[in-house]
Amino acid sequence: MDFGTVIIGVATLLLFFVPFIVVDWNKKRNENRFIAKLLSLATNSACSISSYERWNVSAIGIDINTHMLFFISKANNQEVSITVNLNDASHCYVRNSGRTVKTKGNSIKITDSISLAIVPIEKGKQDVLLPIYNIDYDSPTLNGELQVAEKWEAIANESIRKAQQKPN
């Protein structure tokens, strides 16, 4: 094999693999920036994130010591940040909104949105909704968002239970 063939082979391999490496590097860099924003949101409230999760263009985290829940999302090029004090919540539940579409002999349930709803202790106040999935700006098919919502429902309810047991 001559030197020219080796050079052409190496150049071809580089042209093939470099775009994948660059895309992966940019994805990790953007993910790290997104998590940094979540951590900054917690730091601004004098809290530290004990546990967090990221999916699509959203992230949620909790400080289990102060019972604070932090949520950030970026949809339609608009960033949303929500901080919820679980000391002021009575419970949390998954709000799953959808519709049923009838086809020939079948009915298909289409999920339009999934939100984590935090219900305040104080009567008359509205629930705080953390949008986990919305068909308008997320993928048309669910990719684990329901499981994320159910997991964080359990985490939030456990934190609320502990906050209510804490002596004042």
Image (spheres, rainbow, N blue to C red):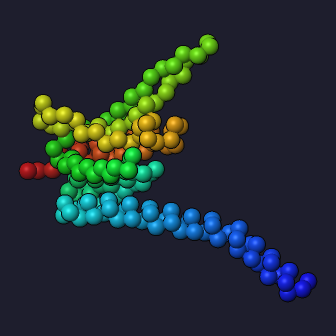
Q: Residue at x 64, y 71 (%)?
A: 18
Vertical position of residue 24 compared to residue 152: above or below: below
Q: Can residue 151 be seen in this snapshot? A: no
Residue 131: image location, x then y, percent: 35, 41
Image point (40%, 54%), residue name = 53
- Could you tell me which residue is drawn at 38 percent across and 60 percent down? 34
Judge from the rendering whether residue 99 lies leftward or rightward of residue 47; answer left or right: right
Q: Is residue 38 left or right of residue 145?
A: left
For the residue pair 140 and 153, the one nearer the viewer reads as 140
State the image quarter where residue 134 is shown: top left
In this orientation, does residue 81 appear? yes
Give the quarter of the figure containing the N terminus: bottom right
* Picture layout, residue 161 above or below residue 60: above
Farthest residue in the left direction? Answer: 168
- x and y percent of residue 127 in the render? 22, 35
Quarter of the figure with residue 149: top left
Q: Tell which of 81 and 116 is nearer to you.
A: 81
Q: Position of residue 71 (x, y in %)?
A: 31, 51
Q: How many marks?
A: 0
Residue 148 is left or right of residue 24, and the answer is: left
Q: Nearer the viewer, residue 103 or 52?
A: 103
Between 146 and 129, the one nearer to me in the picture: 129
